[in-house]
Amino acid sequence: MAHEEALQTTTDSEEESSFSSEEEEDFEDELLHFEERFDAAEDTLSNEKMPLHAHHTRAAHKRLSVFNSEKLHECESDQMPAAKRARTLSWKAETDVDRVPQTLRFLPARELGPQLSAADAHSPMSLFKLFFTESTMTNLCHNTNAQAARAIAKGRKYKWTDVSVDELYRYIGLVFYMAAVKMSSITDYWRQDSLFFLPFPATVMPRDRYPHNFLEYSSNGYTVDFSVYTGKNSFPADRGLSYDAVMSLLDRKVLGSGYHVYMDDFYTSHKLFTDLFALKFGACGTYRDQRKDFFPKTAANSLSRSSSRGSIRWIRDGPLVCVKWMDTQVVSVCSTIHAAYTGERVQRKIKAQDTWKAKSFPCPAPVIAYNQHMGGVDLSGQLLQYYAAQHKTMKWYRKIFLHFLDIAASNAFILYNFSV
């Protein structure tokens, strides 16, 4: 089964991680039904039985002793209010040992990856039509023609011919063509007296037809879901916009559990990360020190402006660890997935005696993972920027429509890469 294959990443073998008959029954029930069980301890895997490589043995014994000595303290501190608990914490350095939170079992609600039949031939156009279907295009044509009729009834003076589904597809093709071939203005695509004459647009649609299209309509980089911000009342106000925006897009019944969510500092908060962990979603993201709802308020043993490059400080509160790392400036990341520091190093170029030399510096595990999965911007955003179909426009709904075209083209491109 696909679900059993996914679980191989969390266990090495049946001998190393065995289950009792009762546990096996519970496990099979969870595989078949994906019941919503929110007890983090019930649905996690301990690292204590995992095989250790020789060069990790000493650190592993040290982590185990730290775990035993701190277990009682953690049980007591968990009963404290968050504000009081924050005052008892202090920043630790890279020489202090941290342990990874218990691993969340990965239980997707469906088979991962695109569900494309290998027996069928898939063209870029057929995959694009998965997102802009014939029925969607028919609805767009109906509303476009109705909007034009309303404009004419109000006194607009121009000749109008109703838009057909085929013509709308050709219009969308021109939009993508203009995204790849940049000109200073729309009319330049139909100019014939220029050194850079482009014959293609005129074969698709007459110049005078193109500008008069009235468009109306009712998360590997693949966009799974989205939410359009329409004002402060878009989400419930009890947790804040950044919290509710993330929670509204994570549906365990659709996704399952065990996923890792990466985000930037607009969304990251102590409350969001701990609640996601309770729902069996790991999280990692940059954070802002000045946020009122964030817990590391202590300055004890923190980084300063004089801290050397590569210096690390971290604080753990249950599954959540916050790290600070001195690069050219302080980088702040928190995670419920990683240990603070596990020995990784990164290369940086430094200037010494008028020459640039490469030098390695210690780097926290959450920082490395964040850069790998985000790279400063999500992959979907990167794909959309390469050939974005955006034009300057006065109408907000046209800009949203063009952005949806970009998402559809990006998703179709990703599916096509899987199919070939």
Image (tube, helix red, strand yellow):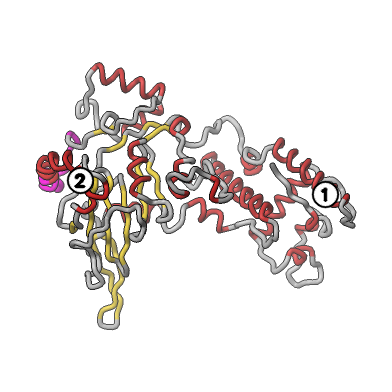
Q: Say which quarter of the image contains residue 20.
A: top left
Percent x, y of residue 140: 73, 42
Residue 120 included in the magenta stretch of the image: no
Residue 45 falls left or right of residue 118: left
Q: Quadrant of the C terminus?
A: top right
Q: 252 or 47: which is nearer to us?
A: 252
Q: Main secondary structure of the magenta part?
A: helix
Q: 69 or 75: which is nearer to us?
A: 75
Disc 1: CA contacts within 10 A as few (<14), some (14-19) or many (>=20): many
- Residue at mark 1: 148
Q: Nearer the viewer, mark 2 or mark 1?
A: 1
Residue 60 included in the magenta stretch of the image: yes
Q: 282 or 417: which is nearer to us?
A: 282
Kindly tell me whether residue 57 is visible in this rendering.
Answer: no
Mark carried by residue 99: 2
Could you tell me the amino acid type at mark 2? Arg
Q: Looking at the image, is 304 positioned above or below residue 398?
A: below
Q: Quadrant of the N terminus?
A: top left
For image coordinates 19% across by 36% down, the residue present is 50
Q: For the residue labelled by badge 1, is the local secondary structure a helix, a strand or a loop?
A: helix
Could you tell me the amino acid type at mark 1? Ala
Label 2 close to label 1 by CB (< 8 Å)? no
Percent x, y of residue 159: 90, 54
For image coordinates 25% across by 44% down, the residue present is 81
Q: Mark 2 and mark 1: span between their CA atoms?
A: 63 Å
